[in-house]
């Protein structure tokens, strides 16, 4: 049976990198590019970058494009295609990003919060393909989240739902950049995690992490911690176990509150892989209500390095599915 | 304009008391009764109590009843009318409570989890009448919750959503009856609260609470604490402030996760009144994300002593509204 493929452009707008690609409706990337975001130059410059980037990936391609999906940080109104004050992208205010791109290319444009785009990406192409409902948690510098309920993004009253990263796991815990206290992000957001591990390493002089970073604490990364854990380093294993405890506490709260029982874990920190997934699973099962215990499940995201592009393009296929 | 009133029976099944009433479609109770639940005698005995109770309130009444609503503890399937292992009601398993009552009276019967019934009661008759979406939190021995989104109960995958009481506010906190650690219920559930206050009073010999309880710690109640606070007792005011901190942390998590921004506070502990509502408001505003800060609002429930009966009866009017 031959199947006619469809194509969409995915734009992954980040504070550091701007990534673009042409993606088929089964999630294959057939053309892509990446550049540094002109973050300091404000929205006009970034819009020009996006337009130039799309034109460039269009140069070599003869495909009929169904639309453009954009995943963006900040408060996004998918209805209006606007992006409001993305953290790490200064001088924005409220920008009708969707309108500008639509005017340039005459294509349907779908703008979505990047965490929601990641969830939609997993639903359309990834680990959520066969799930009606799931929680997506994205572990990176920030901890993002998206709630899929009955194959729809749950947006709440004003579209800002899904901020798992700012759920409190200790009301007397560390101060968070968001202004609150003890958010899960202050425990496992990459920068917070690096800082904590760097401090603790001073008390763990025998940790194999020291060799892997050549005694340079600035080189601590999730990947290094994972490598040390694979070499059976006790401290590195403890760090991953503790992340499982912190994430298990937050995600058990989510599961008890929403009775949505599959958690998909994605993002950079998820590079920790199976040991982290196992640690989260163990802790969440210890904490959820009895009625939920047997159905709760933690699984890794299927989309990896190009998840941002794929998730953004999935917005187009998701919209064309949901009418 | 004369309006034709409609009538429903509301049954509030509790581990201690069984309350029944006939309620009009604007929430007025026109007949009611209450008796001790035969909790130890198992479901058959309790079903007989409910049937007898309904027959008794029917004796003097000539109204055409639209249906029976039952609010029950435990895991309830509104679809099947079943109630599963309610805590405090031993020997249950899974009981098709709705079916038995329907067979007896030939009326439509709607069974719902008691926390959801409380939320539906506020939506149909109370503080949620004009709200599209809100979070209902019920403060009592347990801490219950219900999520109303677009005038529907959010049930999650298997109908168990809304367990705000078992959201973690400190992953290293006190052990909870549910098996988890640091649930909000372990801080402000009535029994936990009484125990903590009784212990702390030993260090607060000058507190006016001592006079109000005649030096008998067994007599500590939310009402007593509130009375002492009204007499400007420092320790009592501190207890209420601290409850606001604990609830503010849990509810900020809920609001960040769901972007549902009105919280309705009901239940016995809500007898604390305005000072507790103010303390929750202050703490939730300090903790929610900037984008949510200006829209978050905490208000007291309007339904009071008969909230259980009214909420149960509201199930009938809610169903007849939603088709």
Image (tube, coloured by chain):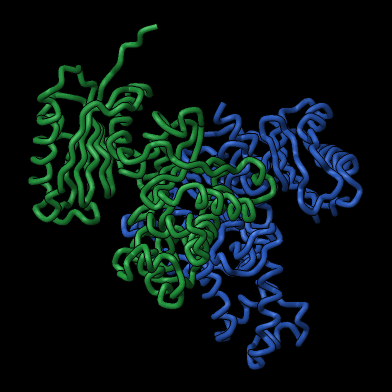
Chain colours: A green, B blue
Instruction: Out of B270 and A146, give the one closest to the viewer.
Output: A146
- Residue A41, above or below B5: below
Residue B299 visible: no
Residue A319 at x, y = what percent? Answer: 33, 26
Q: Residue at x 63, y 40 (%)?
A: A295
- Residue B72, above or below A320: below
Q: Residue at x 52, y 75 (%)?
A: B241
- Which quadrant is the N terminus of chain A positioned in? top left
Q: How many marks?
A: 0
Q: Is residue A307 left or right of residue B186?
A: left
Residue A163 at x, y = what percent? Answer: 40, 51
Rendering quarter of residue B256? bottom left
- Work out which residue is located at the far bottom of the displayed protein and give it: B206
Q: Residue at x 33, y 30 (%)?
A: A314
- Residue B248, above or below B81: below
Residue A230 visible: yes
Q: Is residue A187 left or right of residue B239?
A: left
- Work out which residue is located at the far top of the displayed protein and give it: A1
Residue A10 at x, y = what percent? Answer: 24, 33
Q: Is residue B257 left or right of residue B307?
A: left
Q: Residue at x 49, y 67 (%)?
A: A235
Residue B48 at x, y = what percent? Answer: 89, 39
- Which quadrant is the C terminus of chain A positioned in? top left
Instruction: Out of A224 and B311, give the one closest to the viewer.
Output: A224
Instruction: Out of A13 and A109, give the one closest to the viewer.
Output: A13
């Amino acid at each position: 049976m031959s199947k006619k493929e469809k194509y969409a452009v995915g734009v992954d707008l980040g504070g550091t990198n701007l990534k673009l690609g042409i993606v088929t409706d089964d999630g294959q990337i057939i053309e892509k590019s990446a550049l540094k975001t002109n973050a300091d130059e404000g929205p006009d410059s970034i819009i020009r970058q996006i337009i130039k980037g799309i034109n460039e990936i269009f140069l070599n391609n003869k495909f009929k494009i169904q639309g453009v999906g954009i995943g963006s940080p900040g408060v996004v109104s998918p209805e209006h295609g606007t992006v409001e004050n993305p953290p790490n992208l200064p001088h924005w205010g409220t920008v009708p990003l969707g309108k500008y791109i639509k005017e340039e290319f005459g294509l349907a444009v779908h703008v979505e919060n990047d965490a929601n785009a990641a969830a939609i990406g997993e639903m359309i192409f990834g680990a959520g393909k066969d799930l009606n409902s799931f929680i997506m948690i994205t572990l990176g510098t920030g901890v993002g989240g998206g709630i899929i309920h009955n194959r729809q993004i749950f947006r709440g009253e004003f579209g800002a739902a899904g901020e798992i990263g700012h759920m409190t796991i200790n009301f007397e815990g560390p101060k968070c950049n968001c202004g609150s206290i003890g958010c899960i992000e202050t425990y496992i957001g990459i920068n917070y995690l690096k800082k904590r591990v760097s401090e603790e390493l001073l008390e763990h002089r025998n940790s194999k992490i020291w060799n892997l970073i050549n005694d340079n604490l600035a080189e601590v990364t999730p990947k290094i911690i994972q490598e040390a854990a694979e070499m059976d380093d006790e401290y590195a294993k403890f760090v991953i176990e503790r992340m499982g405890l912190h994430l298990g506490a937050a995600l058990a709260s989510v599961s008890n509150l929403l009775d949505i029982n599959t958690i998909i874990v994605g993002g950079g920190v998820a590079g920790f892989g199976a040991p982290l997934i196992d640690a989260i699973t163990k802790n969440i099962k210890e904490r959820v209500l009895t009625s939920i215990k047997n159905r709760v499940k933690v699984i890794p995201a299927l989309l990896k390095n190009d998840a941002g592009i794929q998730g953004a393009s999935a917005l187009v296929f998701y919209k064309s599915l949901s009418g």
